[in-house]
Amino acid sequence: MRHLLRLCLLSLAALATGSAATIYDNTTTDASISYFYSAYPVTEIGDRVTFGGTERYLTGASVEFFNRGTGAGTFSAIMQLYQNGSPVGAAIGSPVQVNGLAIARSGFLVVDFAFPELLVPDTVVFGVSVSNVVGALDLGLNAYRGPSGSGGAPAIGTSNLAEVFTGTPLSRRPTSATTGNLYFRATANAASTNPIPEPATLLTLGAGLLTLIALRRRR
């Protein structure tokens, strides 16, 4: 009896769990190129990416910063996703902000953004901005070249290697053929695990639990 009850409880718990898959990965080979907010100047820098796999409920994304400033400091990073276009289309979901980031002089920092299983299309433009900067920072986003090296495509997903996106709104900026692929990694679930389970599923499991309780009382 206890074994059956435990199975029912485990089934309920399983409804709220999921395993995220990597749907884009360009984090292998540093291109030794950074795109700095102060250089253009711009408030937002990003890239256009096409996800691999079939999972489209975004759970996380990562970029890499470099600080060429004269000192260390702290800042906040904000990521927003947009519909594909140049300039970009409508925003997808709400921006995700990470606060209290610390970076050293001449330092690198990978920043992870947690998304609440945001449903995304196959191709998006992501934009990253910074705020709350404290210290002598000069921040930029790093470009990578994929696992095959110079001009290489991402390990997972696809991207135009000769463009980045800058400005407000974000618009395409051509680059050389080997430097236009920003460090970016994204994970997603195949289906959302956040919504409340379907009523029919809950009723079935609930009926099973009630049956077990009734049988236990009869004994």
Image (spheres, helix red, strand yellow):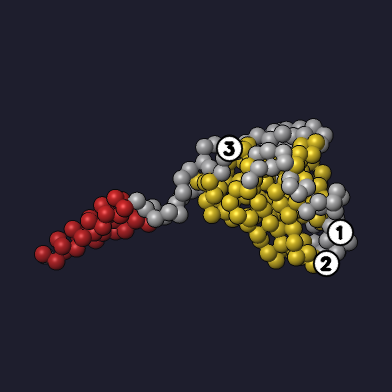
User: Residue 122, labelled with which disc?
Assistant: 3
- Residue 150 percent location from the top left of the image: 78, 33
Q: CA distance from mark 1 to mark 3?
A: 36 Å
Q: Quadrant of the C terminus?
A: bottom left
User: Residue 154, labelled with which disc?
Assistant: none
Q: Residue at the spot x=65%, y=59% of the render?
A: 97
- Number of marks in picture: 3
User: Is residue 209 in view?
Assistant: yes
Q: Nearer the viewer, mark 3 or mark 2?
A: 3
- Left or right of residue 17: residue 100: right
**Contact, mark 3 vs mark 2 (Cβ under 8 Å):** no
Q: Residue at the spot x=57%, y=53% of the render?
A: 115
**Contact, mark 2 vs mark 1 (Cβ under 8 Å):** yes
User: Residue 135, labelled with which disc?
Assistant: 2
User: Is residue 156 in view?
Assistant: no
Q: Which mark is first along the chain, 2 or 3? A: 3
* Residue at the spot of label 1: 69
User: What amino acid is at disc 3?
Assistant: Asp
- Left or right of residue 39: residue 64: left
| Secondary structure state at the residue bearing disc 3 | loop
Other residues around mark 2 within 10 Å, as few (<14) / some (14–19) / many (≥20): some
| Secondary structure state at the residue bearing disc 1 | loop
Q: Which mark is first along the chain, 3 or 1? A: 1
- Residue 181 percent location from the top left of the image: 74, 39
User: What amino acid is at disc 2?
Assistant: Gly
- Residue 81 percent location from the top left of the image: 64, 48
User: What amino acid is at disc 1?
Assistant: Gly
